[in-house]
């Protein structure tokens, strides 16, 4: 039993074939999935998938890429949607200084309002951070002074300092298919040092398919490849990795009761 802690089932490439995608996930032993919201305008579609399927959860959030694509999201926008019965996290949100698709000040303001929503609801913040280590650390540290932030660094690719800050704040760290890529040696060196009880696995499907599916459209079933790889990396049995990451998932996302 594995959980895909981060996927985008409403995106083209997956949504047209949802029954097939879910059947293959079930066959691969994926018990639960989290369909992640990345725009306010996307929330109804994301949440509908979660409402229709018992083993799928949703989130509410605006991706850093879309920080200025819509009217700035308000705390009220997030809190109203976070109250939904299947909504288990706040995000994805954060900073992406690699693509810089939105101005950095808009990304930072967007990030901070999500942090407040996580603090207010107790739902974990799902952080996307790319080429923005220093500001991610600064903002999380500043905001944590106002109260605990439950959270996850999703699709972890950052440096050791971000990992340390995140762990110190009590965050979980989610590994995606990137960990399996041949050129991800530096990432693996950091990942190996993470405590197993704080690790999650995810696909970020339809993006970032793990080896040996690299280059294909990703889907939740493929999280099994990432999990196998991570188990080998930690020199533990795949069953132990699956059990631990599943327990971690239900600790990180406490609103998603194990059924
Ligand atoms: Zn992301
Ligand atoms: Zn994502």
Image: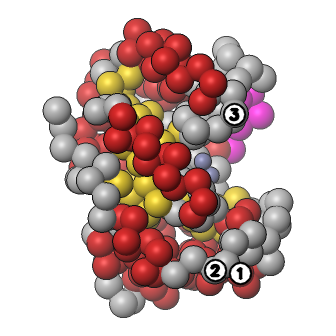
Q: What element carries label 3?
A: loop
Left or right: residue 92 compared with residue 249: right
Tell me which numbered mark, 3 or 1, is placed earlier along the sequence.
3
Disc 2 to disc 3, how far (Cα)?
25 Å
Q: Nearer the viewer, residue 140 or 60?
A: 60
Q: Quadrant of residue 257?
A: top left
Disc 3 to disc 1, how far (Cα)?
27 Å
Tell me which numbered mark, 2 or 3, is placed earlier along the sequence.
3
Write down the region rendered in magenta.
Answer: 180-186
Disc 2 to disc 1, how far (Cα)?
8 Å
Residue topped by disc 1: 106
* Picture disc at residue 12: 3
Q: Can residue 115 be seen in this view?
A: no
Q: Do the residues labelled 2 and 1 touch (CB within 8 Å)?
A: yes
Specify whether residue 153 is painted magenta. no
Left or right: residue 159 compared with residue 58: right
Q: Are marks 2 and 3 in contact (CB under 8 Å)?
A: no
Q: Quadrant of the C terminus?
A: top left
Q: Where is residue 206 in the image (x, y as percent from the top left)?
A: 65, 32
Q: Is residue 183 above or below residue 74?
A: above
Residue topped by disc 2: 72
Q: Position of residue 98 (x, y in %)?
A: 81, 61
Mark 2: give few (<14), some (14-19) or many (20+) Cα within 10 Å. Answer: some
């Amino acid at each position: 039993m594995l959980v895909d802690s981060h996927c985008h089932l409403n995106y083209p490439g997956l949504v047209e074939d949802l029954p097939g995608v879910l059947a293959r996930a079930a066959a691969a032993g994926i018990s639960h999935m989290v369909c992640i919201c990345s725009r306010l305008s996307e929330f109804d579609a994301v949440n509908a998938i979660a409402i229709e399927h018992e083993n799928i959860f949703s989130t509410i959030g605006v991706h850093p890429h879309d920080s200025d694509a819509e009217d700035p999201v308000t705390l009220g926008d997030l809190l109203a949607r976070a109250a939904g019965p299947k909504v288990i996290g706040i995000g994805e949100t954060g900073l992406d200084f690699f693509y810089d698709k939105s101005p950095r000040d808009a990304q930072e303001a967007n990030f901070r309002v999500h942090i407040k929503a996580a603090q207010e609801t107790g739902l974990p913040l799902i952080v996307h951070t790319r080429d923005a280590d220093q500001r991610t650390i600064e903002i999380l540290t500043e905001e944590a002074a106002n109260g605990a932030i439950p959270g996850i660094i999703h699709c972890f690719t950052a440096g050791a300092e971000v990992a340390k800050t995140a762990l110190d704040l009590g965050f979980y760290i989610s590994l995606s298919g990137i960990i399996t890529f041949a050129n991800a040696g530096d990432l693996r060196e950091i990942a190996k040092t993470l405590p197993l009880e704080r690790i999650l696995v995810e696909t970020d499907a339809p993006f970032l398919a793990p080896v040996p599916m690299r280059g294909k459209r990703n889907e939740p079933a493929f999280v099994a490849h990432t999990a196998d790889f991570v188990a080998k990396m930690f020199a533990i049995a795949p069953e132990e990795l699956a059990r631990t990451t599943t327990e971690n998932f239900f600790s990180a996302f406490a609103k998603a009761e194990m059924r």
